[in-house]
Amino acid sequence: MLALCVLAAWLTLQPCPSCLAAEEPVYHTPLAGEAKQVTFMGQQVDIPAVDRTNMTSITVGASLLAPAQGQSPIIPVAAFYHRRITDNSYGRAMVSVFVNELDYLRDLGGWDLVAQFDNDTLPVAGRELRNGEEIRGTALYHGVVLGSLGAGWRTPVYPFQVDNDLRVQLVGRGGYFYAHPEKDTAPGLWVPPNTPLYGARLRCRYDGLRRNLLELPHQGVAAGFDVDYLHRDRWQGEGGPGDRGNRDYTQVEGHLVAAGGVPGLSERNRLLFSLYGGMTAQGRGDRFNAFRLDGAPFPSEQYDLAWPHYSGVIYDRVLARGYATASAGYRRELAFFLYLSTLGSYIWADRSSAVGNNRVDFDEMHGAAATVALDSAFVWDSSLYLAWSWESGVMRNGRSGNGVTLIWNKLF
């Protein structure tokens, strides 16, 4: 009977008659962290409260691509997440061994001490694409490690949940960049020297979103921006000795994410919207300081809101020195634990592209993507994300294609 009920709801986008009869007159979606009693299939279901100030989870999954992204028909993902919030501190870690983000805030009586660390140090050589094919001569190992320390200010905002605040931060930054060739690297490919990095970041964040049971945006708005300045100490541009082009650069990124109801319809129906953009001042973008664009599920976690959303392929790594994306979608609550979403996205990107066998340049591209996704609670305090996506060719640099993604998230 449960399977028939869910199937009927899915196909009609309306609750089946047996569910309607048992529903309360005005239905309210279960919200993140709150205890609630719901009626499902004529039975009372008790949803326990969750302490959202102390959350630990693991995420594993993969996207299967057709056609492949270069030589990669499968893109895996795995990460460990931890958030710990007290009256005096805020700690957050996203760890996936080679790509990590750590953030710690300490209240010093109205002001925050801000400490941050991030690295992007994949142990495989990156290759650029041309018309969907990897160009072996562009293979290069490169990565960056950055630490930040500074001051910030925070204040709670409506609806006053643990992730709802306005924060402003100014930090100094220091780190290291490295690059070196591999066996397929073309002799004439530009390989910059390893170098220390110095700079500063101004960050502003506002999160007024209320999340549902699966931590998906339900109601409200989130927005923010980053202004980054970095100086590469020992630097040699593509022009050889004496070329200091792009040694110093400034980058700006911003985002707006919103979720709300559909006029005249119940709370089971939600509209979703996101807008992202980034630019490198004076065109000083190159392969080594470019923004990294990743397709992903519609953003929900407080820090993930700032990462560009484009509903094409999951966890790809497209390099761009400037970009803009816009996404709009609709989500239907099929049951208190099951959500069906449809999303459409547009992207413009000044995207990296292989030119010949030994040179990487940037080309302006624009395209669109569509995604149909299911989010569901699962056994053992976990959740599943299953999606099919189509993308017009920006992610694969000239080739349109499809992808199926499955992600499992386990809460401890």
Image (spheres, grey):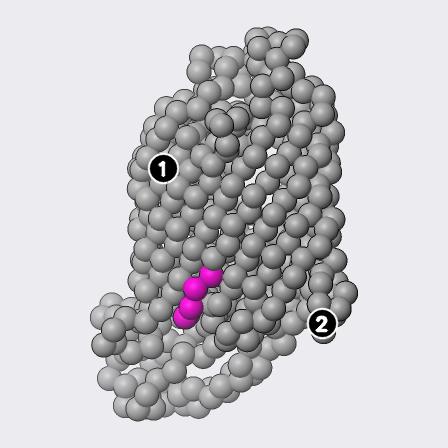
Please report the residue visible at 43 percent of the width from the left and 43 percent of the height from the top.
277
As drawn, 400 above or below 295: above
Q: Which residue is mark 2?
A: 86
Give the x, y percent position of residue 265. 25, 76
Q: Residue at x 49, y 28 (%)?
A: 282
Q: Secondary structure at mark 1?
A: strand
**Location of residue 151 (image quadrant):** bottom right
Kind of residue sitting beneath label 1: Trp
Q: Would you place residue 290 above or below residue 407 in this image?
A: above
Q: Residues within 10 Å of mark 1 (few under 14, many from 20)?
A: some
- Quadrant where the C terminus is found in the figure: bottom right
Whole-percent x and y of residue 12?
22, 70
Extent of the magenta region: 218-222
Residue 361, image x, y percentages: 46, 20
As drawn, is 198 to the left or to the right of 410? right
* Relative height, residue 233 to residue 50 (above, below): above
The residue identified by callout 1 is 348
Please identify the quadrant where the N terminus is shown: bottom left
